[in-house]
Structure formats: C-alpha cells, structure tokens
Amino acid sequence: MITFMNRKSLVLLFGIIFCVQNLAFAQNATLTNIIVTNTRDDLLVYLNVEGAFTEKMKKAILSGVSTTFSYYLSFYQVRNLWFDNNIEDIKVTNTIKYNNLKEEYIVKRSWEKSGPQVTKSFDEAKKLMSEIDSLKIVPLKQLVKGAHYQLRAKAELSKVTLPFYLHYVLFFVSLWDFETDWYTVDFIY
Amino acid sequence: MSNKRRKKTASFISKEEMERRKREVIIGIIIIAVVALLTFVENRIIHFGADIPVSNTILMFILININLLLLLLLIFLVFRNLVKLLYDRKRKVMGTKLRTRLVVAFIALSLLPTIVLFFFSINFITTSIEFWFNVPVEQALENSLDVGRSLYWHTEERNRFYMERISYQITTKKLLDTNNKKALSRYVQVVQREFNFNAIEIYADNATRITFALAPELEDKRFDVISADNLQKEIPPKGVRTVSERIPSGELIRTIGTIPFGSTPTNAQAFIVIARLMPPDLAKKMSSISRGFEEYQQIKLLKKPIQVTYYITLSIVALLVVFCSVWFGFYMAKTISIPIRVLAEGILRVKEGDLSVNIAMVADDEIGTLVDSFNKMTRDLRIGRDQLELSARLLREQNVEIEKRRQYMEIVLKNVSAGVITLDAGGFITTMNKSAEKMLNLKSEHILQKSYKKLLDGQLLELAEDVMENLKSSRNDAAELPLKLTIDGRPMSFLMHVNALKDDAGQHMGMVMVFDDLTELEKAQRMAAWREVARRIAHEVKNPLTPISLSAQRLKRKYSDQIKEPVFDECTQTITDHVNLIRNLVDEFSSFARFPTANPKPDDLPPIIEETLALYKEGHPRINFEFNVTDDIPVLNLDRQQIKQAMINLVDNAIGSIRNEGSIMISLAHDPILKIVRLEISDNGVGISDEGKTRLFEPYFSTKKTGMGLGLTIVSTIISDHNGMIRVQDNKPKGAKFVVELPV
C-alpha cells in the first residue's frame, strides 16, 4: 500500500515537471513560403519563419543580447521500399546584435558572402533574421531527371548569448525558445 | 532451544527490520551528502562559467536534475515514513501516538523557523533586487550612453554641416568636371587641413574614388574605399549616413553624403565622405559604456527570472531543510519512541505473565538504563518465579510423598489386626481403622469428628475420663487397661493401650488408642487352665472314690443283715450314689481334660442335626423344633461323633432355657463368599445376661443348678477343633442365639 501510494505521488510529480517543461516549448513558430526553385546551375530555396519574434525577444535584442536563429535543411531523394537517400544536410544561421550606441541592428547571415548587414530599422532586421533567400542547396547536375526529391526544413532559436552568470537561469525559465516542426516539400525533378 | 527462540522474539525488532532501518539511515545521509556536493559543484561551475559555453549547460542540466531526483528520493523517504505512521496510527500500533507527537513537534520546531526564514529571505531578496534596480544606475548609464550617442551625433552633425558647404562649393565651382580634377584635389586637401578632418574623400557616381585627403595620422595606414553597396544605400532624410569601422588606430567614423547635397544616391553626381578618427581609448570607453548599458539592460530584462530563480533555489533549500528535519524528526521519534514502545510491550507481556521478556537494545542514555533495569527486573522476577515454581514442585512432591506415606499408614492401619483410634487434643475422634470398626462393630463415619464425651455414657465415660485425666496429669504417656465389653450381644475382651501424643514442645496433641481383641485368647487360656484343673481334680478326686465306694458297698454287704436298720442302707446307698455321682463328675472332668482330638472326615451336616433333633422331638412335645436349610450345604470335614455331641449339648442347653413351652429354631446356611456354613440355634427362652455371655464358654459356668457347666465348653472345644467359631447373641425379641460357623 505504501509503495503504491508513493509511486503514485512520484508519477504525479514527474508528470508536473514534464508538463511544465513542455509548456516552455509551446511557442508557435512556423515556416512559411517555402519555395524550391532553380537557377541555371543550382537548386535554391526560399523560406520565412513566422511567429519567432516575441516582445520578450525584441526586448532582449534591444538589451544587446545576441540571438541566433538556426535553419536546418535536409535534402533527400525519396526511394520506394528503401531508406531515403540523404543528399545534403545544411545548417545556416542568422545572428542579430543590436548596437545601442549607434542604435543599429547588425544581422549576420552565415550563408551570405558579404559582411553583416546593418540597419536602423527593427522590422528590417526582423525580416533579415527570418528570411532565407536563394540559398543554394545542391548543384542541379547532382539531381536525376524524373526522380522524387524531398526537402525538409526546420528553424529554431539555437543560441541566446547571455552574460555568463545568468546561464543557469535558463534552467528555470525558458525565455523565448522556439523550435518549429519539420516542414517538407516534395517535388519531382 | 525454546528459551532461545523466546528471547529472539522478545527483542521485538527483527534483524531484517533493523538492517532495513540502518540502510534507510545510510541512504538518507548519502542523499544529503550527494545533494550538498552537487550543489557545491554546480556553484563552482557557475562561478567558473565564463569559459563554459552554453552548450555545456547540458551538464548543468544533468546535475540539477540529479539533484532534483535526489530531493525527490528524500521526499519519498519522508512520505513513506509519513504514510507508515498514518497506517500505524490506523492500526493502533503501540507507540504511534508518541511518535506522532514527536514528529509533529519536530516538524513544528523546524517548520516555524524555516518558514520565518524563508519568507524573510524572500522578502529580503525581493527588496534587495528592487533596491538594486531602483538605484539611479540606469539613469547614469543611459546618460553616459546618451553622451556617447551625442558624440556620434555631433560628429555626424558637424560632418554634415561641413559636407553641405563643401558640396555646395564643389557644385558651384564645378570641381567635378573632368578638367577640374586637380582643382578638386587641391580643394579637398585645403578643406581637410582647413577643417582638420581626418580624411575627406570624393567618390564618383560609379563609386570610384576620385580623390581624397588624409590627415598625417592616417597617411601611413591602410585606408580602404567604401564599397559601392554602402554608397548606394538609401540616405536618410537628413542627407547624411554614417558608417564606422574599427582600425588599429581607433574607430573611423565616416559620414557619407551626396553631391549635390540632399540628393538621392541615384541622382547624385558624386559622393563625399568625411572621416573622423576616434582615438582608441575613447572608442574603447564608448564600447564599454555600450556594453555596460547592455549588460544592465539584460540584467533588468532577467530581473524577474532571477527573482524566480532565487525563489526556487530558496524554496528548494527550504524544502530540503524541512524534509531533512522531518526525516530527522522521524528518526529521532523512532529512536525515542521505539524503546518506549518496546518497553511498554514488554511491560504488557510481563503483565500477561510472560517473564521471558528481554529487551535486546543497547543504548547509553537514560532509556538504555531503563531498559537495563527492566531487563534486570524481569530477570529477577523470572528467577523468583522459577524458585517459587521449584519450591512449589518440591512441596508438591513432598505432598505426594506425604500422601503416599499417609496412604501407606492407612493401609498399615487398615491391615493391622489391632484396632486403632486416635483422638485430638479436644477429645474428638480423628481416625479409626478398619480393625477397630470391625471389633467395635461401628462405622467410622458415625464416629469421626465426634467427641468421646458424646459417644460414651455411663461407666465407660467415667472410665474414659479417668484415663484421660490420668494421661494428662501423670508423667506417664501411656496407659494399659483391660476392657470387657458386650458388643451386639457378644462379649468381647480387649487389651487397650492408650498413648498420649505430644509434640516436640511437649504440648498435648491428642491420643492414640490401640486395642487388641483378647476374647479368643482369653478363652483359650481359660480353657487350658481349666483342663489342667480338671485333670488334677480328676486325678486327685477319682483315687479316693473307689475306696469310698468299695467301703460303702462292703459296709452294706457285711452289716446290712446285722444292723437291719433302713437308715444304714439308705446311708450306704447314698454314699454309693453320690460316689457314683462324683465319679460321673470326675469322669466328665477327665473326659474334658483328656478330650480326644477331632478326627474330621467328609460328611453331611444336615442328617446329623436331624438325628439330634429326632432325639428330643419325642420327649418335648411342648417345644416346637424347626430346622431350615436355606442353601445347598456342601460336604464338610466333620467328626461325626463330636459334632453330634456338640449339637446335643446346644439343643440341651436351649431346651433348658425354655421354661414351659417355646420353640427352637435351627437354620443352616452356606455363605460361598466367606466359604463358611453358618448354623444358628436360636430359642425364645430366658436368654443370657451380658456377663453370662462373656463367661458362657468357660467351664463350670452354668445357669442351671444341676449342670457342671461343661456342656458349652465342650461345644466350644469341638467347634474350635473343627477350625470353626461359636458365638452367642441375643435372639430378638427373646432368648439366645448360638451361631456356629464351620469352614467349608
């Protein structure tokens, strides 16, 4: 009887803990406008993430917190009766940092060759952060005509660089983490 | 073995239970230690955290979760104990009330300060944090940031001011014309020196640098062009745009404007860039101001989370303290209440009579002393009871022994031929053996516990009191006296020994009377004496009789004819007759003295009796003779002649007792149990006095005038020669009854 009761209470406790943890991740961020297209030589992707920015995040960014969005892109050749062939895995990041002295946002996009983009407008910075434009996935010559391909994409807030002594705070309060589901785009080349 | 087992159970706490408890304690201590260690490690990591990347926080996460799990385990332990306590309470296990009280006391004791401290700490933290953020640091930081910003703003503003003028000059002097390239360069250099710019550059509308002038501090440094992108970027309404870059000698602030001033980049004929170099230390200070502000902002942003974190940490610590104290409370309650419970149970068991209780618990505190005392007490009690049991057993054995002896004595008493009667000091009869019962023809139950004073009367009471008095007063403890009694009409002769019983202190305890039946012995002795007398008399008397008789006959023969006197004849005749009479008597005597011993042969008794009766029936018509044979009479060993003689004597005697008319009844019966044939001759004559009964069978005792008194003596002799017995009783309602018993 004793063990049974205790087990029950234990289960309840764990349940509460996990529920709380799940609630922390319950921010609804989605990927939209996923477009797969091509140039003469390359397969390109365009996508936006929506609902990633919250007021809290904006406040944090304005407080000079460097914030990074990560985009995961996986390109597969879909095969029947067999595992899909993973052709390419790409991870790109967009990092934003606010310079309060000059009151400008510096957005660094890992996939762009040119240096960081500086803007005074938060909306523009937001747009820069939540967009992936014409990102090369694979050269077209790697693809087979008529084959079935699939692009899977996901975005998440991977890094918020806080002052070191505040790291541990994250364990108790999840600030503004988000992670989207995997989105897929199927097409036949 | 059983004792051992009892001892084992008496320790109340099984070995497994003890081990389990020990394990629990160890687990508890380990958990607390591990939690403390982990907390310490976490703290260390957080302090060194500057070098630890955020990805390593997974380690932290694990640590904290482990910590939480351990905390949960502690909570589990506490809850387990709590549930157990409740369960025990429900079952009304002894000691739970005390345990509950102790636990409640411990919890209250620990909870009160913990709660007070907790709320105080919360309050303290809240106010502290509020206080930190309320201090005008923010304002100061903002102001310094504003100062920094205004520095940039002023720089830009100043550049804009000059740029507008220079742009105007260039436009009006048409210095952008390809012919005036040199003039433009000169102008730029002049302007640079004039206005003390660090650098001034002119870009064509295709973003190529047409000319530039540098201050001496930049001359030997690398000085990059501004990219076309940068130049083409939209210019805010105020007409200038500033970009800055870090170079080794400081921060280079470049303000970009268009020529003509205020036109859009697409419409611009050229671009003018004025650069100002901010000294490195100033640049550093500026960035530190910026960083400081940022950090402050971030902390402010995290104010709530930090508060929450502190609360959580505090709560965890408070919970840890509470659970630790609760657990400790349980532990203490257990250590206090268990010995008491065990003691109480022990006492209960002692109350129920189980003295084998031994509480196996070693504690060095007062409870330990108590337990020791309890154990000693039970041990002493046990020893006492054992001794008691032993003595009880001994007593029982002794009692059995005594009872055996008593029974033995009783058996001995029952079987001794002498009668034994005991009296206590008050004269109450305490015991009476079978022989006494038989001799006195009494039932002991009618006599026991009765005083002799009530039982006796007349002469006997006097005699008894004399004896008592005599025994009490004299130093003699014993008295011996012959006693003649008639019991149930039978004369009995006893020799009585009376012994006073005295205890060691000489106190009178009562007396014991032992009496022997001397009736038969006396009879035999008398008989022997009489035979001797008879023999002598016969001898002495018979001798002179013959000369007397002969002399008388001679006198008669010789002088009868001469004297012719009838007197003479009468006298001689009388002498002769009486001599004959005497001779007859002497003959009778001598026949008594020399009575032939019986020569018994198997014979039937009834015909002998019938023959005897036949002799008398004719001669005594007024007497009614009856002869009854009730059973089958077996053949007996008889001397026919002697038995007939005895019968004649008895019947003669009976006839003699009947004066005129009466009846004589003879009955013959066989008692197969006693193996005797009983012959009873009863008459309804005058009967025999009590004194007569005792002497009836003695020689020369006769109630008749003519009798020699030898008839019944001879009968008695004959019967005893046949190993039989004769006795006389009163015949009811009248007369006497002779009972002859002959063995089969």
Image (spheres, coloured by chain):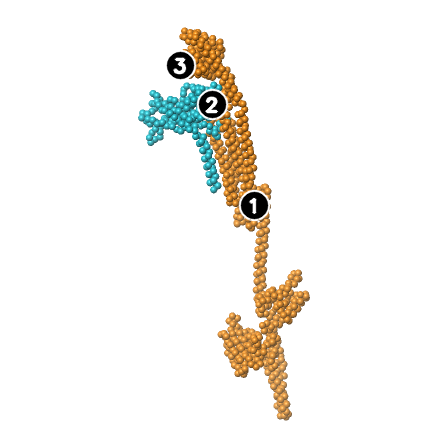
Chain colours: A cyan, B orange
Residue located at (44% from left, 19% from top): A119
Q: Which residue is mark 2?
A: A62
Quick check: marks 1 and 3 in contact, CB under 8 Å? Answer: no
Q: Please name the residue that numbered disc 1 is placed on.
A: B343
Query: For the residues carrying marks 1 and 2, which lies nearer the camera in this image?
Result: 2
Q: Position of residue B205 (x, y in %)?
A: 40, 12
Q: Quadrant of the C terminus of chain A?
A: top left
Q: Chain of mark 2?
A: A
Can marks 2 and 3 be said to lie on one chain? Answer: no
Q: In the structure shown, which secondary structural element does the residue marked by tag 3 occupy?
A: loop
Task: Mark 1 or mark 3: name the one nearer the start of the chain.
Answer: 3
- Secondary element under disc 2, as helix, strand or loop, is helix
Q: Position of residue B197 (x, y in %)?
A: 48, 11
**Could you tell me residue B219's position as x and y percent?**
47, 11
Chain bearing mark 3? B
Indicate whether A97 appears above or below B586: above
